[in-house]
Image (spheres, rainbow, N blue to C red):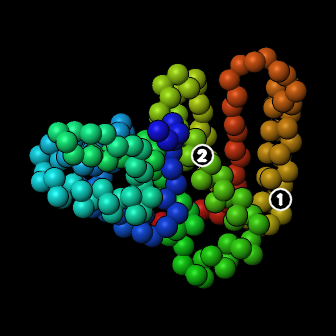
Amino acid sequence: MSEALAPVAELARLDQLAALTHPVRRRILGELLDPASPAEVARRLGIPAQLANYHIRALRQAELVEEVGTRLHRNLVEHQFRAVARAFVLSTALPLSERQRAQLQGDVALQALVQAGDTIRHDAVQLLENPDAAAHASAAIEVDLELADETDRAALVAALLAAVRTAVEPYRQRRSGGPRYRAHVVIYRAAEP
């Protein structure tokens, strides 16, 4: 038997994204949160076994499902499959054009912004999988503002950095054994509507 089912997997390849564009494959993934054979999936979804088998092979080729065992059923060996994760998120590396990738490689601030977005999205999906963790209060603050020039931006960054350092310092060294929290503060130029 393979390892425990991961809470989240990141889709980083075009073939993985293409595999999930088919609605039957998405339904099959939902049925494969627990190990099942193509025949079992076909019965549950009310589709022909050959169709279920075809789509499971495509999902396996895209590495979204894995074979987790076999069993003997009515003198036939049935292969059992399971999804590799409970939820899937789209990697930010996937939708970028070559120009955008080149720009991202040369801009450390943009890299940090993209990484923060990925981390927040990944953590949010994991919180959805863990009701106990989701019960802990989370806060999101969004403020739109206008800055006249680079001097204003630099002053805002300095003020926020000082305020955040002051606010978190009492908690950074404390080891209470309580749940861990993550804070992100990002400042970026808003995209035009």
Q: Position of residue 81 (x, y in %)?
A: 35, 46
Count neighbours of disc 1 (C-alpha within 10 A) and say few if under 14, some if 14 to 19, many if 20 or more. few
In-image side of 166 versus 83 (left or right):
right
Q: Nearer the viewer, residue 4 or 184?
A: 4
Cα–Cα span, label 2 and label 1: 25 Å
Does residue 27 appear in this view?
no
Q: Is residue 98 above or below residue 193?
A: below
16 or 120: nearer the eye? Answer: 16
Answer yes or no: is residue 152 visible: yes
Query: On the image, which quarter does residue 183 sit in?
Result: top right
Left or right placement of residue 150 versus residue 37 in this view: right
- Quickly name the residue at label 2: 120
Mark in front: 2 vs 1 = 2
Q: Tell me the residue at 75%/75% (across/down).
A: 106
Amino acid on which disc 2 is placed: Ile
Element assignment for label 2: helix
Q: Is residue 94 left or right of residue 56?
A: right
| Residue at 76% across, 66% down | 108
What percent of the width, then of the height, locates residue 102? 66, 79
Residue drawn at x 47%, y 39% as measured from the top left: 1
Q: Is residue 100 above or below residue 149?
A: below
**First in residue order: circle 2 vs circle 1:** 2
For label 1, the residue is 154
